[in-house]
Image (cartoon, rainbow, N blue to C red):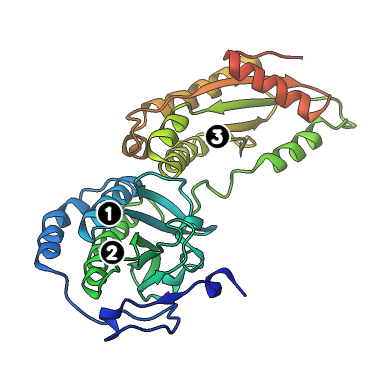
């Protein structure tokens, strides 16, 4: 038995004409119009979606509007990415994960393009009191680009009017997302970090290969560590979604400035590693200096949305012709901490 099958699900009585004990995991909400108050709010906030400059500012606007629109205790704006759904913004700020929303929400019921309006009688978040949940898909050009989620206590179940209001808000968000995609500001189906960026495992494997003795002689292997310090501050203030978006924006900028043969890897939440082709000290310094200029001079909309109106780049690097991959990484991390460039 799965987690959501073990829960007691039911559609609120006002939507089915009376109390029901029959589990209703995926029922279409009966049509009913949003209230005059909700309609007025949607009319007032609608034009603001046209001015959203990036996914984070759009997610923040939608999540805050949703909370007021349906009187929710908690709301979230979820983006559907290649690697799966990602919480781009939630109100109030939380862990940035889907798991606390319950098993049914974690299974992405919006893939069916139907709203989910249900009550969990036993909910880990609210305990014995249970929770009312509402999930509405966000569509762009006919595809599911994400969802708006809302939660409040079981004693205040969401109504069909709430679902209609949230559906209208999702249409505003969907049009804004489509506009951003067409402008080239974002691509709704791409990962937060570009596919060309490797991970820690791949970096260590590539380093071991580069440091292995070669018949043609030893060539210096250069490893640079590049840190965006604002990512940590954005994560603490606005949550992991905006922090990832800031890191994505900075990474995309640097990918566009790499020399042929240089490779980027995601080392930690706020740090990238760059494995460089053999180069003299002044060339390495020049490359890192260029990356620093690009990051600092760019208008990082994701950073502004997350509370960082600018972004900076700290860097350190190390070079070696032989030795262990882990030793070179340690030297580069030490150089990053001191913001200089040791060699061995």
Q: Which tag, 1 or 3, sits closer to the chain's start?
A: 1
For label 1, the residue is 62
C-alpha span from label 2 to label 1:
8 Å
Image quadrant occupied by the C terminus = top right
Q: Please give left or right for residue 198 compared with residue 294 in the image.
A: right
Of marks 1 and 3, the one in the foreground: 1
Q: Secondary structure at mark 3?
A: loop
Residue 196 versus residue 234 in the image, above or below: below
- Residue toward you, 250 or 17: 17
Q: Where is 267 relative to 138, above or below?
A: above
**Inter-mark Cα distance, 1 to 3:** 35 Å
The quarter in which the N terminus is drawn is bottom right
Q: Residues within 10 Å of mark 3 (few under 14, many from 20)?
A: some
As drawn, 318 above or below 105? above
Name the residue that disc number 2 marks.
170
Q: Earlier in the sequence, mark 2 or mark 3?
A: 2
Q: Position of residue 314 (x, y in %)?
A: 51, 21
Q: CA distance from mark 2 to mark 3?
A: 38 Å
């Amino acid at each position: 038995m799965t987690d959501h099958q073990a829960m007691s699900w039911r559609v609120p009585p006002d939507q089915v004409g009376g109390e029901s004990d029959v589990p209703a995991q995926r029922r279409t909400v009966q049509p009913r119009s949003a209230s005059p108050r909700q309609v007025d709010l949607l009319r007032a906030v609608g034009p603001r979606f046209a001015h959203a400059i990036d996914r984070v500012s759009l997610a923040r606007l939608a999540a805050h509007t949703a909370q007021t629109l349906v009187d929710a205790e908690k709301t979230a704006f979820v983006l559907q990415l290649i690697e799966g759904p990602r919480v781009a913004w939630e109100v109030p700020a939380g862990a940035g994960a889907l798991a606390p929303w319950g098993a049914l929400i974690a299974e992405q019921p919006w893939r069916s393009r139907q709203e989910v309006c249900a009550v969990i009688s036993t909910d880990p978040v609210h305990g014995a009191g249970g929770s009312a949940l509402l999930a509405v898909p966000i569509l762009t050009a006919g595809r599911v680009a994400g969802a708006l989620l809302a939660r409040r206590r079981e004693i205040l179940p969401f109504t069909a009017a709430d679902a209609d209001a949230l559906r209208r808000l999702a249409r505003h968000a969907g049009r804004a997302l489509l506009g951003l995609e067409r402008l080239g500001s974002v691509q709704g189906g791409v990962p937060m970090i570009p596919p060309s960026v490797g991970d820690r495992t791949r970096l260590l494997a590539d380093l071991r290969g580069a440091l292995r003795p070669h018949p043609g002689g030893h060539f210096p292997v250069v490893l640079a560590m590049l840190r965006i310090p604002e990512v940590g501050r954005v994560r603490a203030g606005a949550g992991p979604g905006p922090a990832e978006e800031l890191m994505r924006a900075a990474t995309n900028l640097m990918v566009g400035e790499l020399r042929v043969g240089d490779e980027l890897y995601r080392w930690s939440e706020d740090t990238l590693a760059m494995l460089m082709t053999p180069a003299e000290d002044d060339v390495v310094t020049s490359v890192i200096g260029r990356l620093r200029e690009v990051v600092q001079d760019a208008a990082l909309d994701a950073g502004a949305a997350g509370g960082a109106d600018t972004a900076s780049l700290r860097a350190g690097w190390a070079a070696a012709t032989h030795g262990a991959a882990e030793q070179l990484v340690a030297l580069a991390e030490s150089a990053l901490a001191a913001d200089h460039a040791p060699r061995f």
